[in-house]
Image (cartoon, rainbow, N blue to C red):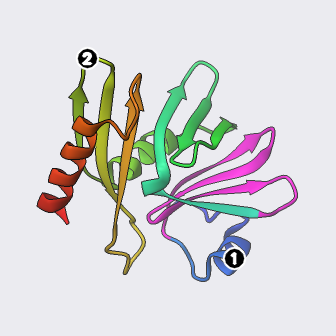
Amino acid sequence: MRSQPPFLKTLSAVAGAKPKILAWSPTQGEYQNIVVALAFLALEDNCGEWSFLGWETIDQGRWNPKTAVLSFTTASNLDFEVVLSKVGDLPAAFQERVNASIVFTRQFDLFEGSATISKRRSLAAGDDAGHWRIVTKGVSPDHPDIQAQYKRLRREYD
């Protein structure tokens, strides 16, 4: 049986309930711990304060096994870079949770660039709302062709 993390009582109090932890690691640098929980990602900073991110808010993640750095970007363009002290299965659990939040993804190539339209879902119990996102490269998300695809997909999936 895995031992409980030393911060479990504090994390549970801040989260409002004991979370189902899939993986965790002490970290180096700006944060002291990272936690992959069933419903959220949690980061404890060096002052003992916890931050929580819903899996549906994480847009891009990268794992570098040589440096043990997990980096990711959120939908609100916040960049995170976390150096894991004990890797274990945390990178795989992170990827699995992000993937579990994806309802679907559609890629569209245009002459001017490309767009990805996705619908994500929160993994928190009781949150059935979908979160729509348009990510573009080289073209505005307001491009008429992208907006037409977005409206069509919303009609089909909402």
Q: Is the magenta stretch mostly helix, strand or loop?
A: strand
Residue located at (61% from left, 82% from top)? 16
Q: Position of residue 75 (x, y in %)?
A: 51, 48
Q: Residue at x 24, y 48 (%)?
A: 150
The type of residue carrying mark 2 is: Phe
Q: Report the residue marked by disc 1.
A: 14
> What are the residue bounds of the magenta stretch?
20-49
Above or below, 104 relative to 62: below
Type of amino acid under label 1: Val
Residue at 55% x, 40% y is 73
Q: Indicate the position of residue 36 as horizontal and vertical percent values.
A: 53, 55
Q: Residue under circle 2? A: 111
| Among the 4 quarters of the image, the one containing residue 130 | bottom left
Lateral position of residue 71 relative to residue 119, left or right: right
Above or below for 157 versus 147: below
Q: Mark 1 or mark 2: which comes first in sequence? A: 1
Secondary structure found at label 1 = helix
